[in-house]
Amino acid sequence: MKNLGIKISIFLNYFVFAILLNSVGIVIAKSINVYHVSESQASLLEAFKDLPIAIVSFLVASFLPRFGYKKAMLSGLALVFFGCLVMIFGNSFVYTKILFLSIGISFALIKLSVYSLIGVVTSSKKEHSSLMSSIEGFFMVGIASAYFLFPAFYSDTDENAWLNVYYLLSGLIVISFIFLLFSKIEYEVEAIGSSLKEDLTRSLKLIIVPLVLVFLASAFFFVMIEQGIMTWLPRFNEKIFKFSVTLSVQMASILALSLALGRFLAGYLSKFMSWVTLVIICIVISGGILLSVLPQLKVEIDSLVEIKSLADVPLLGYILPLIGLFIAPIYPLLNSTVLSSLPKNLHSPMSGLIIIFSALGGTIGSRIVGELFESIGGAKAFYFLLIPMLLLIIFVLLIDKISKKNALKES
């Protein structure tokens, strides 16, 4: 099969970075418990992860095709390998910032390359949507793995034992690096312009296209929702449901598994129904889950003592993370809709814009939830997520309206 090697490499790289990137919620909880920082201070880790993603994406997206996707991914893997080693031997909150800084820079290179290569190795919009959903679904499998991987290294007698997980992660990075190094990539992508300056100029002009602008707002609001839930769910489980530290992280894996299943299903369902209809249904159900679960937490919280066993987890503890099943299809469907409608030589700069606005949405969403968590409590903090949900519905409808208008002009 043509390009099989690079497809496997894409899945493998995405899996490794899923564990690293989305361990931020776990590390936030550990930073609060081990390094004794406040919730608002710990929430800064999201910014150390997301802002480098945005900055690097802006700086390199336009000329990445010239540099080479394979070189970019190898560079990202090498950088994050050293970030893991720094975390092991640094063992302080300062070094968690350095770790997530390296993860952010590296992931920008990986995600730009992956999103651009999807357009290269697929030949139709349906194939593009299917591969995009599958890769994003596999990403969520990696996230779910993190929720089991990290607790496996926890110890009741040694608060620093959890750092040993980074030895294992360093090994996975080395394997991924070697596999990618020997993978053959068969593609040819034309640069956007005749020089780096022209590449950047034409890339920036994308942002003034109405469809692109509205789409970027949608990506921003979606990631605000996703990261607001994903980053703070381990801490939410610990504070609101009174789960033990280990159980809090393991129960958060239900969210990741729900997201994985939802994205795999999205690739299938998008063949039979409009992406707009599917996205709006998913948003409405997600909001309904929040509105049905959060009001009940006041009653539940007073009667709970620390829970250490899955058998003792209340029903609400299982229902809340199932929201992932419904928010999951939104992101890949939005991305695929816009990317597959653009020429392939614009996929890298468009991917850069997606990553930038996604990173900003993740940082702002996590920061707001963190501040609210500290000031008004976790149960009330999650009500904030209903606002970006409503805004996302509005912008999705605008995307559909603009797309139909553009289609009429072309015909």
Image (cartoon, rainbow, N blue to C red):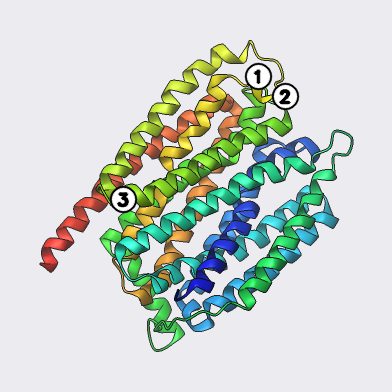
Label whose residue precedes the other's in the sequence (2 or 3) = 3
Q: How many marks?
A: 3
Circle 2: element type: loop
**Can you say whether 211 is above or below 244 in the image?**
below
Q: Residue at x 40, y 46 (%)?
A: 265
Query: In percent of the image, x 42 and y 24: which residue is there?
Result: 291
Give the amino acid type for the residue marked by disc 2 in the picture: Lys
> Mark 3 = which residue?
270
Label 2 to label 1: alpha-carbon separation: 8 Å
Q: Which mark, by number, is residue 312?
A: 1
Measure the C-alpha gap from mark 1 to mark 3: 38 Å
Q: Is residue 205 above or below residue 252?
A: below
The answer to the question of whether label 2 and label 1 lie on touching residues, with beta carbons closer than 8 A, is yes
Quick one: label 1, few (<14), some, or many (20+) residues within 10 Å?
Answer: few
Residue situated furthest right in the rendering: 157
Give the percent coordinates (x, y) of residue 215.
33, 55
x and y percent of residue 185 in the render? 51, 79
Type of amino acid at the residue the image marks with label 3: Ser
Residue at label 2?
308
